[in-house]
Amino acid sequence: MEWYGGAFYHTIVGIDMRSIRIIPRLDIKGPNVVKGIHMEGLRVIGTPKDLARKYYEQGADELIAMDIVASLYGRSPDFDLMRSIADELFIPLTMGGGIQSLHDINNFLRAGADKVAMNTFAIRNPGLIAEAVHEFGSQCIVLSVEAERRPDGTWEAYTDGGREHSGKNAIEWIKQALDLGIGEILLTSIDFDGTRKGYNLELLKAVTAFAPVPVIAHGGARDGSSLAEAIKNGNADAIAVASILHYGDCTVGSLKKDLCACGIPIRSTP
């Protein structure tokens, strides 16, 4: 058994089988967790601290907490709030939102993050990625990509919580960030976000086809079968889940049982 990029790989008669991670995602605006469709029309779901505890107790493998308006408002993240989330958990935690400097990354790590996710300011200043990798290590730096389909069939990377055009081709941006040393990719499909119609397999396959680091699929979870499709057909290394957990359609435990029934290896079952 070998550890790589946050996932266990088991070799059985020459076949590598990944131990898939189920990762609840908390999108935070002010003191609340919110959720929308296509990253718009945000509805209040609950408090970050309570939901973090809930999903941890359900058996989450990791958790993602993103301040989705910090960059839009041009402010620093609420590190005290992020610390309150970390206090509830004994699993790996990825935090992001509003990162403008190495100082912000350090503050996230001091608040309890194991990894930090970068998007808006990394697009504006790619050199920040290289500096962060050099200072903290690639295993700590996650590239958060919010991608939307263009009329020509390509995908554009968006910033500021999926609100602003960057003008960058998402695939080319990911390749550039890989060259700068990122250790993981959090891949959000704006087109599928909150729709519950399954993950964007076309986008997912376009990235996993060349990415040498783990890819977390996000946006569109419907049920356990949609997670299985993202893993088997999209080659996702991990699955980020939000709406179907927030609204009680599924639990982390039920999703893991569904994946087990599909023959997909998971970390553990509550």
Image (cartoon, grey):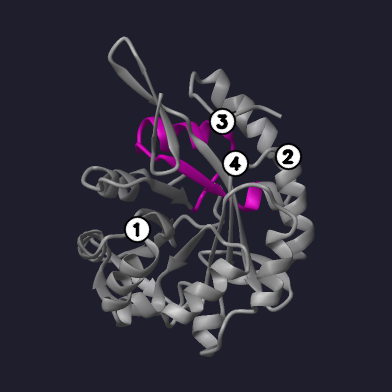
Marks 3 and 4, Cα distance to the nearest angstrom?
7 Å
* Element class at badge 1: helix
Pick the front one: 184 or 36: 184
Magenta stretch contains residue 46: no
Circle nearer the N terminus (1, 2): 2
Q: Are marks 3 and 4 in contact (CB under 8 Å)?
A: yes
Give the residue number, with chain letter if any, for mark 3: 267
State how far apart marks 1 and 4 are (Cα): 20 Å
Q: Position of residue 63 (x, y in %)?
A: 60, 52
Checking the image for residue 79, the label placed there is none
Q: In screen coordinates, is 153 left or right of 100?
A: left
Q: Residue at x 34, y 75 (%)?
A: 122
Q: Relative to residue 248, is residue 88 depicted above or below?
A: below
Quarter of the figure with the C terminus:
top right
Disc 1 marks a residue whose amino acid type is Ser
Tell which circle, 3 or 1, labels the residue nearer the N-terminal end: 1
Q: Which residue is mark 1?
A: 138
Residue beneath the point at 20% across and 61% down: 179
**Residue 104 seen from this side:** yes
* Residue under label 2: 58
Marks 3 and 2, how far apart at CA: 13 Å
Amino acid type indicated by mark 4: Asp
Q: Which residue in the protein does label 4 denote?
A: 61
**Front of the two marks 3 and 2:** 3
